[in-house]
Amino acid sequence: MSLDAVLDALAAVCLVAGALLSLAAGIALVRFPDLLSRMHAAAKPQVLGLLLVLLGCALRLRTGVDITTLVLVGAFQLASAPVAAHMVGRAAYPHDRIRTDLLITDELAAHLDRISERS
């Protein structure tokens, strides 16, 4: 077996695994009960799925320009997805879009008056 065949097989595994993680994230967006759970599903497995797809593409393409572009896409996704999820959660918190009965610890409850005044 040649190195190209091994890299192509590894790329296929990464692509399928990434696609399945992204599918699981999409299903979770529909099925999860509240905003925080959906936000978690949109951020965590979706980003890992995208990184696996990018790794699979990098293993398949194997050129410097393509790999550099894929690394930039992954870096921007890693930088922007957690920040966006955090901002959505903070914006939705004072508007009763969160089921507090599902929370283990609610660190913002003591600051709800201050948060509600700003919005």
Image (cartoon, rainbow, N blue to C red):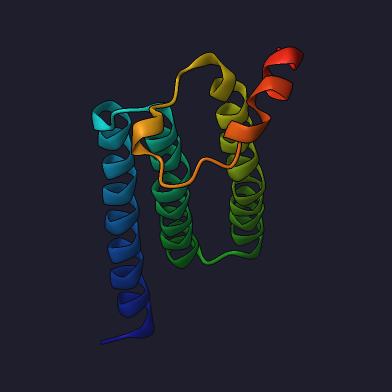
Q: Residue 54: x, y in percent?
A: 48, 55
Quarter of the image that includes the N terminus: bottom left
Q: Residue 53: x, y in percent?
A: 41, 54
* Residue 3: quadrant of the picture: bottom left
Q: Is residue 116 above or below residue 56?
A: above
Q: Residue 82: x, y in percent?
A: 59, 44
Q: Residue 52: x, y in percent?
A: 42, 58
In this view of the protein, which residue sits in the foreground, 118 or 68? 118
The residue positioned farthest toward the bottom in the image shown: 1
- Would residue 58 be found to the left or right of residue 84 on screen? left
Quarter of the image that includes the C terminus: top right
* Residue 60: quadrant of the picture: bottom left
Q: Residue at x 35, y 53 (%)?
A: 18
In this view of the protein, which residue sits in the foreground, 71 or 63? 71
Q: Residue at x 27, y 55 (%)?
A: 16
Q: How many marks?
A: 0
Q: Residue at x 58, y 54 (%)?
A: 70
Q: Residue at x 45, y 49 (%)?
A: 44
